[in-house]
Structures are given as C-alpha cells and as structure tokens.
Amino acid sequence: MHAYLEGPYVYLYHTLRYFTGKGTARGLSSYPSSPWTTEDLAIQVLTIDPRFKIAMPVLNIESLAPRQSSRIQDCLPIGLESALSLALSVECAYGSEARAGLSLHARGTDDGVGYDTVDLCGFEIPLDAGKRVRRTVELSPKVRYVKVIVENLDGLHAVRAVNVKATVGS
C-alpha cells in the first residue's frame, strides 16, 4: 500500500489483492500452476471533511470494435462504502459513418470480487456521428462496489477514445 496526502484527502493506493477461485482478477498468478490470482485494487480516498466529492477514471479504451463489449475485468472497482452518491461520465468519439451509439452497464457487488451478472442499472450514450459525445448520469447505488461495462451497439463501426469517470461524494 502507498499513501499520498493532499489537503483534506488521504489517497491510499492498494496495489494488489491475492485470492483463489473465480472472480474478476486482472493480474496473473505468480506461478502458472498456482491457484492464487492477483487483482489491481485502485484507490481508496479518505478525508477528514465529511463533505467530499472526487472524480477518478475507471475505464479507458482506445477503440471498441463493432458489437464488442468491454470486460468487467477492464474496469477499476468503484468503492462506495462511505459515499452516498455516484455519477458516471462516459465520453467517446464516434466516426462519421457510425449508425448506433454505446450502452453502459453498471454491475454491483458486496465483496469486490463476485460482480452481479445482471445490470444494477444501465443507460445509452446517444449517437452523434463524427463527434465526441459525453453523458453523465447520477446514481444512488446501495452496494459497496460498482464496475462498468461499455457496449458498442454499432454492427459496422468502432467507437474511439471511450473513457468512463466515476465521481463519488457524500
């Protein structure tokens, strides 16, 4: 773990978590035959101020192919233990020939490992061919962790520069 202090915030960087079995691991086992797997854990933000709001990137994809979805393992976990609100902002660039937009799927979990197989919620990012589009949606999830999956609904054209940011607050 690494810590960084800035104003009223304390940033704790949890670098790896080891566990066995199925889950959302993004790392590799130490040994090919080992049952242990590692997962990058992202950032935990602590504050002495009871009112806070902080934004962080959770998913960045250079290009999402036609009819392709990101994997849940690609998204960093969004911890909501002390947060009361969550806003998800999605930004992407559509090609001039694009015919359909993106869909975002949010999945929850109580343990940070076994994410739901059914969406907690979802929303569409509207198509505006040839332009960058950004949409933010506010949520009030009652789960401890959230991850997102983005899906390209266009059957012929890729979507570029897909970025998802999470803003959590009290």
Image (cartoon, helix red, strand yellow):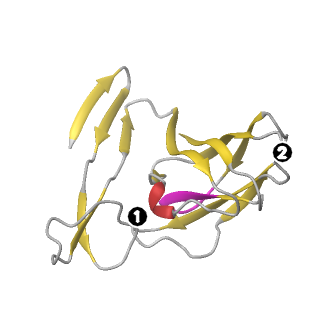
Q: Which amino acid type is marked by label 1?
A: Gly
Question: In the picture shown, does residue 66 fall above or below 20?
Answer: above
Q: Which residues are magenta?
A: 141-150
On screen, residue 121 versus residue 33, left or right, reads right
Residue 101: image x %, image y %?
79, 52
Residue 32: image x %, image y %?
18, 73
On screen, residue 107 versus residue 133, left or right, reads left
Point 82% across, 48% down: residue: 98
Mark in front: 1 vs 2: 2
Q: Around disc 1, counting alpha carbons within 10 Å, would you say few (fewer than 14), some (14 to 19), or many (20 or more)?
A: some
User: Looking at the rendering, in which quadrant would you find the N terminus?
Assistant: top left
Residue 170 seen anywhere in this rendered image of the structure: no
Residue that carries the numbered disc 1 in the rendered image? 112
Q: Which amino acid type is marked by label 2?
A: Glu
Point 38% across, 39% down: residue: 45
Residue that carries the numbered disc 2 in the rendered image? 97
- Considering only order in the chain, which callout, 2 or 1, is on the residue closer to the N terminus? 2
**Distance (Cα) linking label 1 and label 2:** 39 Å
Q: Main secondary structure of the magenta part?
A: strand
Residue 51: image x %, image y %?
52, 32
On screen, residue 71 versus residue 96, left or right, reads left
User: Looking at the rendering, in which quadrant would you find the C terminus?
Assistant: top right
Residue 83: image x %, image y %?
51, 47
Point 49% across, 70% down: residue: 115
Question: Residue 69, which numbered label?
Answer: none
Tag 1's secondary structure?
Answer: loop
Q: Around disc 2, counting alpha carbons within 10 Å, would you say few (fewer than 14), some (14 to 19), or many (20 or more)?
A: few
Q: Pick out the residue farthest to the top.
A: 7
Which picture quadrant has residue 142? Answer: bottom right
170 falls in the magenta region: no
Question: In the picture shown, does residue 82 fall above or below 25?
Answer: above
